[in-house]
């Protein structure tokens, strides 16, 4: 298990004053995630999130990991840092398997996605270099062609592959952290529950050392103060969260089950240590906070950080705000010290 320093999760979280640089960008050039604009326009707007300047790393590898059934291949980018965090005598480093957030909008001629690894390239490089660990970012298949729970099986396949091949790649198989933001945070939390409840879930992957949950979606649907006061104008639209969920889930799927709504799990104990990050100006603020509370209540080690001045998606805004950049570096520092 990771050596994560526990912090007390507060009884409540709030928003205060939005970071000045972030506020200026929201008003002048920030795209919208969700809402009701044409999909082509939404995708075009999101190109501004592809970083112009990239933190140097030792290498970026483009991998194809076979699915558990061998029928498809999942694309994965591995970011190898220049500075290695070799904490053990064998010289191996840890690894973060990362699941990015995103959204899908349906159209009568098919589907388009908003949210891909290009938009997260800057953050992945920063986290790899600041942590000294390898980062494996998954480009999972999207609905409507691939419906839930296909994505969870892809994550499991990547974890299984890394546990088997890690040592040859310089990774300690016992120091694998799963993490993600938004929808990726949801899948990270669910994967940890599946790993704990193997007999019920059928999970066959490795045990996990840690979970990194960045402004995770942990409950569907949700009626919270954060969902109403941050419903529009702060990058992620509340309606966008629901659009993503309903398009990803098969028709008739019970969304209350713990594999979709991890907050509904009967127990949140006996899980990997969790670093949970929430933001004041985020529709998902309260459900992320509630999940951190549930983890801590049931005895799971929790490190909790709340940014009262941030919006959803801040790790994608590192070129727009110095504070977003520093907070993304801080995530790498947590992994450096814990993993």
Image: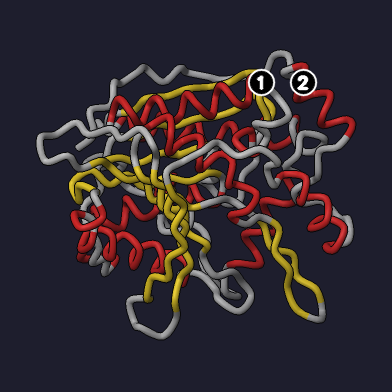
Residue 334, quarter of picture: top left
User: Where is the C terminus found, in terms of image quarters?
Assistant: top left
Along the line of sight, which residue is nearer the eye, 33 or 126? Answer: 126
Q: Secondary structure at mark 1?
A: helix
246 with respect to 25 (left or right): left
The answer to whether one can see residue 282 in this image is no
Seen in the picture, residue 231 relative to 326 is either above or below; the reply is below
Percent from the top left, x then y, of residue 9? 41, 20
Seen in the picture, residue 22 relative to 80 is either above or below; the reply is above
Which residue position holds label 2?
21
189 with respect to 22 (left or right): left
Percent from the top left, x then y, of residue 230? 74, 32
Q: Secondary structure at mark 2?
A: helix
The answer to whether one can see residue 84 in this image is yes
Seen in the picture, residue 26 relative to 157 is either above or below; the reply is above
Q: Crowdedness of circle 2 by 10 Å Cα count: few (<14), some, many (20+)?
A: few
Percent from the top left, x then y, of residue 115? 66, 55
Residue 204, quarter of picture: bottom left
Along the line of sight, which residue is nearer the eye, 29 or 146? Answer: 29
Q: Are marks 2 and 1 in contact (CB under 8 Å)?
A: yes
Residue at image coords 54%, 45%: 217
Which residue position holds label 1?
322
Q: Residue furthest bottom?
A: 71
């Amino acid at each position: 298990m990771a050596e994560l320093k526990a912090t007390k999760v507060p009884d409540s979280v709030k928003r205060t004053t939005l970071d000045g640089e972030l506020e200026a960008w929201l008003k002048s050039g920030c795209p919208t995630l969700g809402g009701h604009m044409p999909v082509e326009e939404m995708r075009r707007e999101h190109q501004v999130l592809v970083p112009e300047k990239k933190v140097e790393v030792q290498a970026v590898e483009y991998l194809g990991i076979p699915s558990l059934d061998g029928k498809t291949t999942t694309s994965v980018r591995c970011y190898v840092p220049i500075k290695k965090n070799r904490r053990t005598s064998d010289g191996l480093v840890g690894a973060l398997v990362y699941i990015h957030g995103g959204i899908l909008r349906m159209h009568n001629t098919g589907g388009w996605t908003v949210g891909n690894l290009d938009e997260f390239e800057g953050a992945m490089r920063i986290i790899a270099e600041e942590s000294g660990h390898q980062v494996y970012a998954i480009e999972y298949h999207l609905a409507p062609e691939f419906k839930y729970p296909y994505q969870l099986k892809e994550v499991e396949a990547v974890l299984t592959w890394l546990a088997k091949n890690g040592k040859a790649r310089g990774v300690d198989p016992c120091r694998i952290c799963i993490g993600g933001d938004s929808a990726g945070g949801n899948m990270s939390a669910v994967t940890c529950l599946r790993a704990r409840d193997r007999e019920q879930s059928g999970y066959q992957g490795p045990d996990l050392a840690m979970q990194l949950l960045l402004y995770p979606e942990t409950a569907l649907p949700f009626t919270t103060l954060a969902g109403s006061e941050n419903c529009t104008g702060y990058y992620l639209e509340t309606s966008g969260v629901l659009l993503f969920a309903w398009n990803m889930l098969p028709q008739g799927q019970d969304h209350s089950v713990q594999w979709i709504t991890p907050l509904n799990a009967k127990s949140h104990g006996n899980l990997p240590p969790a670093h949970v990050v929430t933001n004041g100006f985020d529709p998902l603020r309260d459900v992320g906070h509630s999940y951190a509370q549930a983890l801590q209540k049931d005895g799971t080690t929790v490190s909790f950080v709340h940014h009262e001045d941030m919006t959803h998606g801040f790790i994608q805004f590192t070129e727009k705000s110095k504070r977003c950049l520093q907070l993304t570096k801080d995530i790498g520092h947590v992994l450096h010290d814990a993993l």
